[in-house]
Amino acid sequence: MKLSILIALFIGIAAPAAWAASAMPVVDVYKSPTCGCCSKWVDHLKANGFTVRSHDTHDVATHKARLGVPAGYDSCHTAQVNGYLVEGHVPAKEIKRLLKEKPRARGLVVPAMPMGSPGMEAGGRKDAYDVFLVNRDGSTQTYAHY
Ligand SMILES: [Cu+2]
């Protein structure tokens, strides 16, 4: 085999792995130690390539206030990635989009706990829900609809 082919093969194998490692930041998750759906959401993030630091706490509310979850938009767990807030059962796909688009915003929220969202799987049941972008002033807008 020619050396150039070997090099091309090597780059083809190594480059995507290097890209994935550098492009996927750590997600800090704050959740109650007894929250089952929170743990399932953590599994969803890991399955989608994120590195997760999970912090068990009995005072998730303090972290919600610190990260700026707007009133009425709270869910079970709250998280932070690259300075962005991620509240509730937000699909990994939307977090990746957020990190790519880098909007001037606080982050993303999925209020409450919609059935069928990542970590809230229940048979085949899927409720419609919105992922909201939280602007810097605390106002929200629809980011994605499921
Ligand atoms: Cu939950």
Image (tube, rainbow, N blue to C red):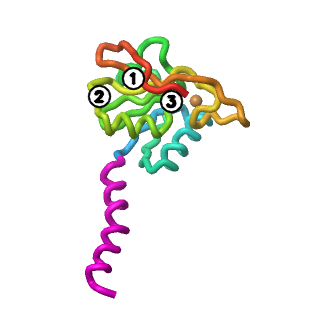
Residue identifier under label 1: 133
Mark linked to residue 77: 3
Q: Does the Cβ of the disc 1 residue fall within 8 Å of ligand 1?
A: no
Helix, strand or loop at mark 2 = loop
Mark linked to residue 103: 2
Q: Mark 3: give few (<14), some (14-19) or many (20+) Cα within 10 Å.
A: many
Q: Mark 1: give few (<14), some (14-19) or many (20+) Cα within 10 Å.
A: many
Viewer-proximal residue, 90 or 37?
A: 90
Question: Which amino acid is tagged 3?
Answer: His
Left-right relation of 121 to 103: right
Viewer-proximal residue, 3 or 126?
A: 3
Q: Does the Cβ of the disc 3 residue fall within 8 Å of ligand 1?
A: yes
Are the residues tagged 2 and 1 within 8 Å (C-beta)? yes
* Magenta region: 1-24
Question: Which amino acid is tagged 1?
Answer: Leu
Helix, strand or loop at mark 3 = loop
Looking at the picture, how far across and down is residue 46, in whole percent?
Answer: 49, 48
Q: Residue furthest right?
A: 123
Looking at the picture, how far across and down is residue 59, in whole percent?
Answer: 47, 25
In terms of image quarters, where does ligand 1 lie?
A: top right
Residue 109 falls in image quadrant: top left
Q: Mark 2: give few (<14), some (14-19) or many (20+) Cα within 10 Å.
A: some
Number of numbered tags placed on the structure image: 3
Question: Which amino acid is tagged 2?
Answer: Pro
On-image quarter of the C terminus: top right
